[in-house]
Image (cartoon, grey):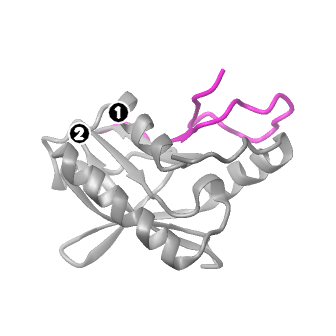
């Protein structure tokens, strides 16, 4: 679990912009498929028609503070063990900057409800993670309060802290 302090409003706004601009992908049978915040993910809906929801979670770099590769791999292993214990199906996924200046491996989890997903994401210190009901637009869930002066378009963002 992360013990990092919440970022200040300026950093939070900057991270929000980075998360909204990032590329997200999931893998099936060796092929990578796009996920876009604000749009449905029809490839997932077609490939997994019985899934009720999807979420992309990572254990890398809690609170978007860079850690060593070894620390990140250990955290990823712990996340895999936690996912195995849930019994939910999950697939390889990743998040990255469009210019590939950063890339974080993660996992696309199916059928976990929002509360369970938020608890898992919070357990691994993630400030932002994707979760959405099947057939609906992808949403960014931010484990923070919305900065009062935020001017960015955040209609596909769920702010989890009041």
Q: Is residue 135 above or below residue 84?
A: above
**Residue 8 location in percent, x, y?**
82, 42
**Residue 14 location in percent, x, y?**
78, 53
Label 2 crowd (10 A; few <14 / some 14-19 / many >=20): some
Residue, disc 1: 116
Can residue 104 be seen from the camera position used here? no
Query: In the image, what residue occupies the spot 37% across and 46% down?
Result: 55
Q: Residue furthest top?
A: 162
Query: Is residue 72 highlighted in magenta?
Result: no
**Residue 84 location in percent, x, y?**
20, 53
Query: In the image, what residue occupies the spot 54% across and 49% down?
Result: 126
Please say if the residues under marks 2 and 1 sit with CB atoms less than 8 Å apart.
Answer: no
133, 13: nearer the viewer = 13
Mark 2 and mark 1: Cα distance apart in space: 10 Å
Can residue 11 be seen from the camera position used here? yes
Q: Is residue 61 above or below residue 50?
A: below
**Residue 129 location in percent, x, y?**
50, 47
Residue 22 image-quadrant placement: bottom right
Query: In the image, what residue occupies the spot 61% across and 33% down?
Result: 155
Circle 1: element type: helix
Q: What main secondary structure does the magenta stretch of the protein show?
A: loop
Question: What number of labels is visible?
Answer: 2
Which span of residues is magenta-colored? 135-162
Label 1 crowd (10 A; few <14 / some 14-19 / many >=20): few
- 58 sits to left or right of 65: left
Q: In this view, does 103 lie above or below 114?
A: below
The earlier-in-sequence mark between 2 and 1 is 2
Q: Quadrant of the C terminus?
A: top right
Residue, disc 2: 111
Circle 2: element type: loop
């Amino acid at each position: 679990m992360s013990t990092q302090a919440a970022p200040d409003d300026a950093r939070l706004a900057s991270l929000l912009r980075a998360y909204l601009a990032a590329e997200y992908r999931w893998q099936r049978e060796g092929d990578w498929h796009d996920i876009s915040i604000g749009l449905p993910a029809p490839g997932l809906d077609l490939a997994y028609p019985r899934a009720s929801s999807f979420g992309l979670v990572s254990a890398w770099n809690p609170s978007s503070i860079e850690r060593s590769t070894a620390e990140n791999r250990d955290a990823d292993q712990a996340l895999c063990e936690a996912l195995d214990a849930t019994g939910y199906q999950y697939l390889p996924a990743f998040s990255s900057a469009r210019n590939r200046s950063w890339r974080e491996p993660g996992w696309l989890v199916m059928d976990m409800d929002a509360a369970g997903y938020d608890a898992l994401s919070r357990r691994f210190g993630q400030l932002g993670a994707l979760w959405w009901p099947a057939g609906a637009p992808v949403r960014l869930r931010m484990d923070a309060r919305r900065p009062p002066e935020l001017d960015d378009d955040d209609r596909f963002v769920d702010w989890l802290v009041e």
